[in-house]
Amino acid sequence: MNNKRSSDGTQSRANRDTDVIVVGGGVAGLYLLYRLRGLGLESIAFEAGTDVGGTWFWNRYPGCRCDVESLEYSYSFAADLQQEWKWPERYGTQPEILKYVNHVADRFDLRRNIQFNTRVVSAVYNPQQKLWTVSTDRGAKVRATFCVMATGNLSTPRRPDFPGLEQFKGPWYHTGLWPHEGVDFTGLRVGLIGTGSSGIQSIPHIAKQAKHLYIFQRTANFSLPARNRPLDSAREQRHKAEYSARRKAAFDTPFGIAGYPTPTRSALEATDEERRVIYEQKWAEGGSISFLYAFNDLLINKASNDTAAEFVRNKIRQTVNDSEAAELLAPKTHPIGTKRLVLDTNYYETFNRENVTLVDVSESPIDKITSEGLRVARSDYALDSIVFATGFDAMTGAMLDIDIRVEGGISLTDAWQHGPRSYLGLTVAGFPNLFMITGPGSPGVKSQMILSIEQHVDFVADCLQHMRSRRQSQVEAESEAEQNWITHVKAVADATLYPLANSWYMGANIPGKPQIFMPYVGGVDKYKKKCDEIVADGYKGFSFAS
Ligand SMILES: Cc1cc2nc3c(=O)[nH]c(=O)nc-3n(C[C@H](O)[C@H](O)[C@H](O)COP(=O)(O)OP(=O)(O)OC[C@H]3O[C@@H](n4cnc5c(N)ncnc54)[C@H](O)[C@@H]3O)c2cc1C
């Protein structure tokens, strides 16, 4: 096939349909389309859902809310947008964030590049033609020079695989695939499985409606009060007056969120009373970053972490009237903060309701689902409806669901058989012209994600621009750079308490998934600096071809 070069260095249009294929129409996919258009590159995005929003399109369960403050969890790329948008509450609700994402799509006319209701099933690279061919579940095949996976880290719901589910007579729901019309649990006996973030957020809401709510808990998770409230307009004005400086400052912080003084003291340097006062103050303030910033070693020193964990366990004991339930709810199997730290509104208080029962399934797992409900340790629970808050095949699920391969070369499934490999969480050696947004090996899920998404999209857009100006048509991560990065990501994680938890960061929630700690936890600040150095060094670790 003709592989002529056009005057700007890219391949001629004769053998391809577009410059860049984007997979995903969430926050990342939208910003990609915006940046690519700005570069004068043509793009097509495919989105499995019927509209934009990604996470905020799919997760419509009651109580779904962001746990990063609204003024932070938003795009920074357009000054007018961030000045004009009004967030009503401290933390955005799912409907509010979805409204915002829709507004962005309309304001920047991004929908015209997106094909909705279309799932990408394979992406195959032809090294001779230097082209990706992407196939969809609607039978289309589209060819492009570059393919960018904006498929999300938490976009592949973990489908319940309990034996007997097909016999259950009532309706069941997954929090990550919630019906758009909502669900009315009034008068129903509801079973809820899973007490991670989605479970903890939805439980207080479902309990208010249901006749009885049975919560089946395998692992207790730490949750802190969100202290959500209407956004104070004076505070909003102050924040907006300093927006650009705050956005810039966020890149100098580990979690990509500015405004919290960096702690300088170990928890062990404080007296019991000093610690108590500080933790009380953080508990009253609400929010996870504030709490984890109480001292400088909560995520690296087990003894320090124990002081914070015990403080929260005591709060749970003080809140939950039934001491047996309180003890079950007080997490003891992992250090605080090493699993996603949840923010809630009245979660522990909900266990004081007459119509709520906590069922411990840590020792005796759920035997099976029956036509009438659920059986645990030979006890039957009669249920009208079941909610699965069982989370996601995180970080790798969406990528591995697509058959990604190089003709005559390897497939991503093979490359990642022992766990994900990447250079910077952006590219995978052996897969030219393929990028990921906030892929495994990047700080994405351990940060304010919109900030990390913008940083990755900017990296990709700048790289494509760099190539165009040099008339290069192929970029690939070098194997050695990738291996060095993987070694570094592991060393950084091993110096923390994170690997002590059986978390989705480790792949531990999916049977058979390789147990590798996937995110980069060195911090957004160090990561961004590293990326900037790599670019300044002529994209060190990447090889380019014409
Ligand atoms: C319940 C919940 C709460 C969260 N709260 C926070 C928070 O408080 N703070 C924070 O920073 N982050 C939070 N996150 C993380 C959140 O995912 C990110 O902040 C952000 O929305 C991710 O955007 P994205 O575009 O990268 O991915 P997503 O929003 O996941 O979008 C990816 C899109 O790709 C589509 N897709 C995937 N595979 C294919 C395919 N093969 N073909 C076509 N389309 C495909 C999916 O349908 C999806 O719409 C939360 C996540 C969840 C699930």
Image (spheres, grey):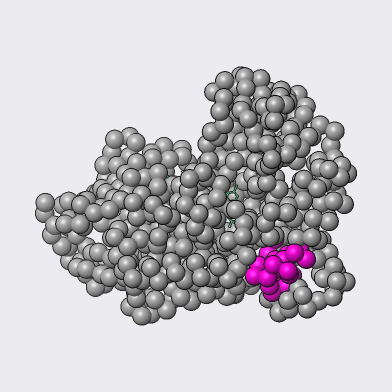
Q: Is residue 476 found inside the magenta-colored segment of the image?
A: no
Where residue 501 sits, quadrant-wise, is bottom right
Q: Is residue 306 above or below residue 403?
A: below
Residue 26 in view in this figure: no
- Residue 103 is left or right of residue 2, and the answer is right
- Segment colored magenta: 288-308
Where residue 493 sits, quadrant-wise, is bottom right
Residue 348's x, y, as percent?
79, 46
Q: Residue at x 49, y 67 (%)?
A: 490
Where residue 540 sits, quadrant-wise, is bottom left
Q: Residue at x 66, y 24 (%)?
A: 373
Residue 398's x, y, as percent?
44, 47
Residue that protrudes farthest toward the left in the picture: 2
Residue 108's x, y, as percent?
45, 54
The residue lying toward the viewer, choosing from 227 and 314, is 314
The residue lying toward the viewer, choosing from 446 and 23, is 446
Residue 290's x, y, as percent?
72, 66
Q: Residue at x 48, y 48 (%)?
A: 513
Q: Quadrant of the C terminus?
A: bottom left
- Residue 474 is left or right of residue 267, and the answer is left
